[in-house]
Image (cartoon, rainbow, N blue to C red):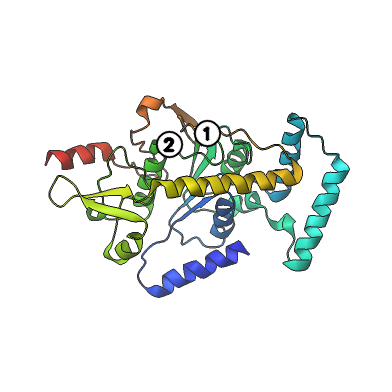
Amino acid sequence: YEREDLQTVINHLRASGTVSSIALWGRSMGAATALMYGSRDNTISCMILDSPFIDLATLAQELVERGKEHGVHVPQIVVSMVMRMLKSSVKQEARFNIKHISPVSHAPKCFIPAMIVAGEHDDFIKKRHAEVIHREYAGDKNLVIVDGDHNSPRPRYMVQGAMLFLQSCMKVSASLELIVPPDTSLLAPPWLSPENLKSLSTSLKLRKGTGAGRLWLSAEDPRQSAQERKKQQQKQQQQQRLLAPTPPSLNDEPGVCFSRSSTDVSRNSAQQNDVVPYDVTGATLPDMSKRQQEIQSS
């Protein structure tokens, strides 16, 4: 039903008459929802799919196998019983078959430009899920593998690359561009319009830069992000205990590897602040670091 909820939100945005293009950025189940919706609506400008899974049954089985690696042995017959009970309960209460939660089956029918992301050390949804979806995906696609786990903050180069991807696919005007300081976490795309400025002011703080007319984007309360991440970790551990009681070992270090289609580009930690331009739609994206230098020199 998440796909239907997403449809309702998109219908509302389009009916408002204030949106010219829509992109989807989902993480974990959100990525799965975006992919399953994308196969039915090719008017979406692009998608960023962070840690999507192949299907629910495969994910559950992998959690059981992971428990065995940590000395927790769950007999296969027990796993089968739990899955049957879960399937029956969901079908009775929600009236749908959990076997239909299969994002990978939608990938061959999806032609929206997509950026697919996965954590190298993700123990909850292993990176192979993203690799399989990337292989099956029909549209233009990029695969980004970063260091870290399921809940690790994504490295700056990945986020900046995602912003360039969104800006290109959504055809955002350069006049709406914001200059972002190197030490600032990006919590929103680096552009604003008068329509969304008011809504963003509740979560973002804007202040004047040293140059005339420059706006700088910064997080209003970094502790809020940390608290949200802790909640996500607790929720993930609860889900894992259903089939594999041992919680994962979390690695919070940012990522260092960028992969696109058949070409891998290694990045060390000293280069994390660099923007990584890449081509998803067929047109070479601009070097935004040069753009910032030109603005600063002027």
Give the residue at the far right of this rendering: 77
> Which residue position is annotated with label 1?
148
What residue is at 73 percent from the left and 30 percent from the top? Answer: 70
Which quadrant of the structure image shows residue 16? bottom left
The amino acid at mark 2 is: Pro
Is the residue marked by circle 2 packed among few (<14), some (14-19), or many (20+) residues within 10 Å?
Answer: many
Kindly identify which residue carries mark 2.
155
189 lies left or right of 264: left
> What x and y, as percent, mark residue 221?
37, 49
Mark 2 vs 1: CB contact within 8 A = yes
Residue 160 coordinates in the image, percent (x, y): 36, 42
Q: Measured from the top left, where is residue 220 in percent x and y?
A: 34, 51
Q: Calculate the distance from the C-alpha at mark 2 to the C-alpha at mark 1.
A: 9 Å
Q: Amino acid at mark 1?
A: Gly
For the N terminus, the quadrant is bottom right
Eyeballing the image, is 287 above or below 34?
above
Q: Is residue 150 left or right of residue 268?
A: right
Relative height, residue 168 to residue 152 (above, below): below
Is residue 220 placed above or below 158 in the rendered structure? Answer: below
Residue 140 shows in the view: no
Residue 182 seen in render: yes
